[in-house]
Structure formats: C-alpha cells, structure tokens
Image: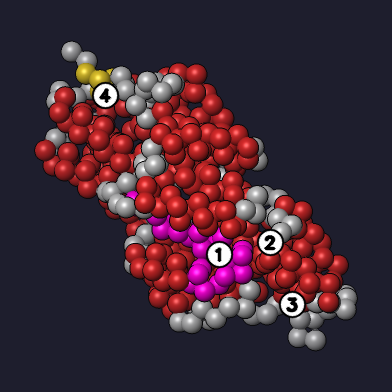
Amino acid sequence: MTKFDKRGNPVSYHSQSAIEALDRAFDLLHAYQADPLAEADAIIAEHPDFAMAHAFRAGALATATDKAFEPELIKSVRAAEALASKANDRECLHIGACSAWLDGDWNRATESWGRASIDYPHDLLALQYAHVGDFFLGYSQMLRDRVARVLPHWDRSIPGYGFVQGMYAFGLEESGDYAQAEEHGREAVALNKQDAWAVHAVTHVMEMQGRAGEGAAYLGASADGWAPNSMFAFHLWWHKALFHLDANDAAAALKLYDEKIAAGGFGQALELLDGSALLWRLQLLGHNVGERWTDLADKWETRLNDAYYAFNDVHAMMAFVGAGRGASQTHQIATAKRAAAGQGVNSMMSREIGLPACEGFAAFGRGEYAKAIDLLSPMRGKANRFGGSHAQRDMFSWTLTESAIRLGDRALAGAFVAERLSWKPESPVNRAWGLRAAQLKGRARHVKDTA
Ligand SMILES: [Fe+2]
C-alpha cells in the first residue's frame, strides 16, 4: 500500500516512522535550522534502502555549491540511483535532479526538481531545491514564477504554507516587486519566526531600498527567532553588517564579521563568500581590516583548483587580492580559464563572468584601475548569469565606482555615482562617493595608471 508524507506526497518506502522522521528533517531544511544532514544520516543509518532519504541528502549537499562536499554528494547520488528502480515517479525526478547536478548540468537539475513541484505541488522539498537552483543560476524571475506555479495549490491549512510564501517573497524581491515581496515575507515570518529565508526576503527588500537603519533594526529585533540553531544565520548577520556599513558604521560591521561570520570557522564556501564580500567592501571604503584577510585567503587557497562554481572563484580572488597573494591570484585566474574551457553551466559562468571578474579584481588590486574598469564594466548587465542576488552582485558596482574615482575619471565616476544614488539617494556611502567624484578635476579615460 502506498504511503504518504505529511503533505500527501507519495513515498515508496514501507516505514511510516522513517517517512515521518524524514518530514522532520525536511522542515529543518525549510527553515534553515539545525543540521538536516545529521538527521538524514541518522535515518539512512537505520534505513539504508530509503531512496528519498538519499535524494534529500544529495539535494542538500548539491545546493551547497561547494566542491568540498562532492565526495559525500557522489555517495548519496549513487545510493539514490541504485534504489531508483524501486522509487516512484516523484522520487525519480528528485534522483534525476541530483544526478544532473553532479554532472554539472544545474539547469536540468533545477528543471527536474521544478517538474516534481508541478506534478506534486505540495512537494515543498522539490520546490525549495528548484528555488535554490534558480538562485545559483541567477534566474531572478524564475525565483518568483516557479513558486507562483504552485501557489494556487496552497493555503494555510497545508503544513509549510509559510515557507512557500517566504520563497515567493524572495522571488518577488529579486524581480523588483518590493512592496509585494515585503508583504509576503512578513506574512511568512508572522507564521514562523524561525523562517530564515522569509526574514532574508524582507531583509533584501530593505537592502535594495536603502533602508539601512530599519534593516539593521529589523534583523536585530527578529534574531531571537531565526538565529538560534540556524545554519543560515551567518548570511543574515552579513546582511546586518552591510546595513551598518551603508550607515557608515564600519566598527559595527567589523564586530559582526568577527563575532558572527568568522567565528563560525568558514566551514563551507557559502560562509567564505560572505567573508570576502564584507571585507572587500570595507577595504574599498578605506577601512583597515587588519589581518582578517589572512585566514580567509588561507581557507580559499584549499579550493584553488576547484573550478566548481565561478561565483566562488571570484570571491576567492577578492581574498587573494585583499591578502596581497599574487601567486594565488595567478593560480585562480588559471583555474577560471580551465573552467571556462570546459563543459556545463559553470563553463558558461566562468567564460561570461568568472574569468573577467577575477582578472578585473586582480587588476584593481595592482592599482590598474582603467584595466579593472575595462574588464568589469561590460559584465554589469549580465552578471546575473553566474548566480547570486542583486545585493551580492552589487560588489561590481562598488568596485567600478571606486575604480573610476581612483582613476580620476570624473565623467565615469559621476555616472556610476548617479546610478547608485538613483536607487539609494540617502546612502552615506553613495553620498561620500558623490562628493569624491565631484572633487575630481577630470582626466582622460585611458591615461596610463602609472601616470
Ligand atoms: Fe542575501
């Protein structure tokens, strides 16, 4: 007799207690709480022939976008594939998605999870993995529309309704619909104050609208809900640090870096990304970050040969520039070139964004600001192709603005500042850039940097 999970999805496994345990592990992942992988391990230890448990573990490992997890990902994918003949159609879509991800075909993987969420609209796990896939692929509108496809099938009576609202909120935010995003995000947080993704969606709205003071206060006031036992807290603290930085409070940003971001030990690429992204912004604004780059660069160096995800490569490069490690910069560029010459989605990302961005940041580090601008400027309109959020990709605008000012190109600096002020007119950071740009005397665009 067919068994079902708590949302009514068919599960091809005989043990209802194992299915219920897996439901609890799903819910941890939906809220980004505790350690869903440890839960999966415990279930698999007792039920090694539970296909969906392996597919769940594989999906979580895949969407961490960290080559360090690949050996474990391979184990889970192979275990799930070996059980596929006993799995139902829905589970086969999950298994196929994980196999595709492992093959480097993140598009096929995301579509497979997406198809599972269409055929089984209450398959919240499939929706979440597809949502995260859209995030890493940089598909802003799909972050919204893939969730919209299933919304008619959901209401408050179905467990996990708030998580759907939280995902929809983030998709709306990345699509520029800030009012609706905040409404859906706040509704989700009201339903579950532990829902870190929904808090994150509201946070992004405030980031994009330049509501720095309000954003820092919102995260501070809501932290009792999302921070305890969260595996995503580091990223929300990173956002709070950005708010402080945007309000010219570098000391508060550095305190968060030390106590809430670096203190976690940078055990995964996602945390290293936030470390690089925060220190890079601090350093661009002239703040002394001390020896903090050293630890970060050491950890990125263990990933120098990964060629796994261009977004990671670029953030590794930022650390190598920050730490002044020329050999690692050269090595990272070689890795990005190798990735660009390969196959799969990361090859495209590396060709289009990763490689020129690595070269552009390295040029910036050498003080070759004209070269940095030449490399970074053309990618502004297509940087979404290597994934991430608007807020994360804002590093390109920051670097270009600072480069134009240091180069002394008054027209270009003024243009970049105008762009920034158009959407964050009150930002002290933007205004300070505006003042510096206005003080430039004007200089030809392509003079030698050493002049
Ligand atoms: Fe974010």
Residue at the disc numbered 2 = 427
- Mark 2 → mark 4, Cα distance in angstroms: 48 Å
Determine whether 217 is above or below 16 in the image: below
Residues rendered magenta in the picture: 230-254
Q: Which of marks 2 and 1 is nearer the N terminus?
A: 1
- Mark 1 → mark 3, Cα distance in angstroms: 24 Å
Q: Which of marks 2 and 4 is nearer the N terminus?
A: 4
Determine whether, in the image, residue 114 is placed left or right of residue 421. left
Q: Earlier in the sequence, mark 1 or mark 4?
A: 4
Dot 3: element: helix
Give the amino acid type for the residue marked by disc 1 in the picture.
His
Give the amino acid type for the residue marked by disc 4 in the picture.
Asp
Tags 2 and 3 in contact by the CB under 8 Å rule? no
Q: Which of 199 and 103 is in front in this view?
A: 199
Asked if residue 121 can be seen in this view, the reply is yes
Give the mark count.
Answer: 4
- Mark 4 → mark 3, Cα distance in angstroms: 59 Å
Q: Where is residue 332 in the image (x, y as percent from the top left)?
A: 51, 69
Asked if residue 325 can be seen in this view, the reply is no
Q: Residue 5: give its label.
A: 4
Residue at the disc numbered 1 = 244
Determine whether 358 is above or below 110 in the image: below
Q: Residue 175: give its label.
A: none
